Amino acid sequence: QLQLQESGPGLVKPSETLSLTCIVSGDSISNNSYFWGWIRQPPGKGLEWIGIILYSGITYYNPSLKSRVTISVDTSNNQFSLKLSSVTATDTAVYYCARFRRSYWWFGPWGQGTLVTVSS
Amino acid sequence: QSVLTQPPSVSAAPGQKVTISCSGSSFNIGNNYVSWYQRLPGTAPRLLIYENNKRPSGIPDRFSGSKSGTSATLGITGLQTGDEADYYCGTWDSSLSAGVFGGGTKLTVL
């Protein structure tokens, strides 16, 4: 059964870089039918699409975050990562990782999510 | 402001039917598959409907999806109190070369 698990610091200081990793089990991250992605949900707000990556390194990012986001993949360890630079309080959110079906555009399954708070 | 437009809230009584709309454009819904997600309180979102109208295994047939032109609709019949959740539509936007979500709809089962 495919499972995804986010990990990383729960507290990041303003202007620093948020770093999260998603460990994938039950499927190979090199599966050509799927991208691997990040989504976030700020407190009291809706879902926001952050970006996705294919095992080959091809990426697509939300244009509003593109200048600050980097998603990378580590096929040897079956995991992928998110870096978001120059964070502010508005980046406080629950961050989810999920598998993204190529060409059909759906996320599933999702990780349980991890709360990241930006505060000094 | 979301690229896809959903009503902020809907409500209905137990046992009744409700529909949730998701409106977009030719850049997104009009030319791409739509998916729907359910986020129960305190849990991660889960895939409810994919490729416009397909249900993953384990999702009851009380949930259905449809698409027409640049709009999509999620239908839920035989409402239960356990269906109270936030529902989101999602798709790909070809002009942005990125995925997009609707703003979400809060379902209340009265």
Image (spheres, coloured by chain):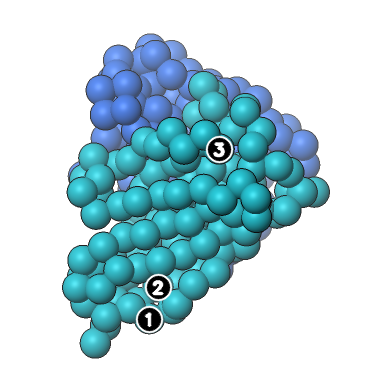
Checking the image for residue A45, the label placed there is none
Checking the image for residue A116, the label placed there is 2
Q: Are the residues under marks 3 and 1 on the same chain?
A: yes
Residue found at x 44% / y 24%? B72
Q: Are marks 2 and 3 in contact (CB under 8 Å)?
A: no
Residue B79 in the image, given as x and y percentages of width and height: 63, 46
Mark 3–mark 1 Cα distance, whole angstroms, equals 29 Å
Mark 2–mark 3 Cα distance, whole angstroms, equals 26 Å
Extreme residue in the bottom direction:
A120
Q: Quadrant of the C terminus of chain A?
A: bottom left
Residue, disc 1: A11
Q: Are marks 2 and 1 in contact (CB under 8 Å)?
A: yes
Q: Are the residues under marks 2 and 3 on the same chain?
A: yes
Q: Earlier in the sequence, mark 2 or mark 3?
A: 3
What chain is colored cyan? Answer: A
Q: Left or right? Give the position of A75 relative to B2.
A: right
| Mark 1 belongs to chain | A
Q: Left or right? Give the position of A84 relative to A39.
A: left
Q: What amino acid is found at the position of numbered circle 3 in the picture?
A: Tyr
Mark 1 secondary-structure assignment: strand
Q: Nearer the viewer, residue B98 or B17?
A: B98
